[in-house]
Image: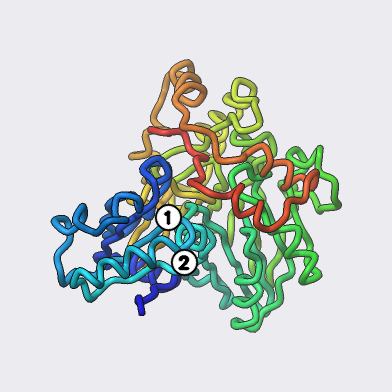
């Protein structure tokens, strides 16, 4: 029997920066578009159809005693290739359970730090998608920010910690992944918050996020800061006067793109004002915690994605473009391809359409692509 590696086991290896060899047997176009990255991952691609007559195409690339994790789209082809490798004498071969589809949905919690009054802040890393969500708990209460579609893991985590989820917040109307915020709030009887300027077309009730109206989780304050640019309603959060959750406005190595609602020219000024003025008036000691990461190098030891705000003003090239026209050109012309099915995802997050679960999985396939490439 072929040995199986779960997405949880693989995530732990990536998070701990263990040397990991991936043999991806999807077709080259799919591989080039989206692959497993992070930590000390080495990944090679050899399409499945090249291995149907034997594993000779990869034998020279693999050492017989190496641990090899074979990956495909859903987990079927990888098992067949793993069997062929075992028949060829490789003993330390695994097939990734569920393939890239399961990898896309795995969430890995990482403790960010203790909060005043005994609270704790956690970052949930969606390694296969580059999405980051947050779990704030204090005094038996919890708030979740930028919730993924897989809401069960947050409920299980809250139960494990013995806390009640009271608030669910989205920093903006997402275009790269389906938010589970509203559904989670309904399931647990909590309050769902959304920036009102992003909610003009939503079909459901929500509580507006408003600057000046802090949200209390036990003794911890979550302070909304209006920070438009990625969307017209984008809102950041200051937590416990130490952490700045920037949504899709500011990342560790890049900045947010303003074009996913088709209004790049209209929103570029807002983006610049947020990054070059609004954030500059905040403490440079704030720890920036974004809603996404785009580069494997952004994963620090233990998997956490974070950086001090002051450090980002020194080394993030998106924050160092003094000429306004050059900045405008950068964020309207220097853009990666748009996220997969982003228009359908936006409509889903507005409540305008309700795709079946399999369709949702298909819509979310691929990287997040919320950043300006630099």
Residue drawn at 52 percent across, 65 percent down: 107
Residue 306, disc:
1
Compared with 252, 7 (above or below) is below
| Visible residue check, residue 220 | yes
Say whether marks 1 and 2 touch (CB < 8 Å). Answer: yes
Residue 21 percent across, percent down from the top left: 26, 62
Compared with 280, 66 (above or below) is below
Residue 28, disc:
none
Q: Is residue 258 left or right of residue 46?
A: right
The residue carrying mark 2 is 112
Please state which of residues 91 and 242 is positioned toward the viewer in this rendering.
91
The picture quadrant where one finds residue 193 is bottom right
Mark 2: few/some/many CA within 10 Å (<14, 14-19, 20+) = many
Q: Earlier in the sequence, mark 1 or mark 2?
A: 2
Please state which of residues 192 and 90 is positioned toward the viewer in this rendering.
90
Residue drawn at 50 percent across, 72 percent down: 114
Marks 1 and 2 sit apart, C-alpha to C-alpha, by 9 Å
Q: Is residue 252 left or right of residue 152?
A: left
């Amino acid at each position: 029997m072929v040995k199986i590696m779960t997405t949880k086991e693989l995530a732990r290896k990536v998070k701990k920066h263990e040397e990991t060899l991936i043999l991806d047997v999807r077709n080259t176009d799919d591989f080039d578009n989206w692959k497993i990255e992070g930590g000390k991952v080495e990944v090679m691609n050899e399409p499945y159809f090249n291995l149907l007559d034997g594993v000779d195409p990869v034998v020279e690339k693999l050492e017989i005693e190496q641990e090899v994790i074979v990956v495909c789209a859903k987990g079927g082809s990888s098992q067949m290739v793993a069997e062929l490798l075992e028949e060829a004498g490789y003993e330390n071969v695994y097939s990734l359970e569920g393939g890239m589809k399961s990898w896309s949905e795995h969430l890995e919690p990482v403790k960010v730090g203790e909060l005043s009054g005994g609270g704790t802040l956690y970052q949930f890393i969606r390694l296969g998608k580059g999405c980051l969500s947050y779990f704030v708990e204090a005094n038996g209460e919890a708030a979740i920010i930028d919730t993924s579609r897989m809401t069960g893991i947050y409920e299980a985590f809250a139960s494990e910690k013995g806390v009640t989820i009271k608030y669910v917040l989205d920093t903006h109307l997402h275009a790269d992944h389906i938010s589970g915020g509203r559904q989670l709030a309904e399931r647990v009887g909590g309050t769902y918050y959304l920036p009102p300027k992003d909610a003009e077309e939503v079909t459901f009730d929500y509580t507006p996020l408003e600057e000046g109206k802090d949200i209390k989780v036990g003794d911890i304050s979550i302070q909304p800061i209006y920070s438009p640019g990625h969307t017209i309603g984008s809102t950041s959060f200051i937590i416990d006067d130490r952490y700045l959750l920037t949504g899709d406005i500011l990342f560790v190595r890049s900045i947010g793109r303003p074009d996913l609602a088709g209004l790049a020219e209209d929103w570029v000024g807002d983006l610049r004002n947020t990054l070059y003025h609004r954030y500059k008036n905040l403490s440079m000691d704030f720890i920036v915690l974004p809603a996404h990461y785009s580069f494997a190098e952004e994963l620090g030891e233990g998997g956490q994605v974070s950086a001090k705000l002051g450090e980002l003003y020194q080394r993030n090239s998106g924050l160092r473009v003094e000429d306004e026209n050059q900045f405008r050109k950068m964020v309207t012309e220097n853009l990666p391809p748009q996220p997969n099915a982003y228009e359908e995802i936006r409509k889903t997050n507005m409540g305008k359409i309700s795709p079946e679960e399999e369709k949702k999985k298909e819509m979310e396939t691929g990287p997040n692509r919320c950043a300006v490439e630099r």
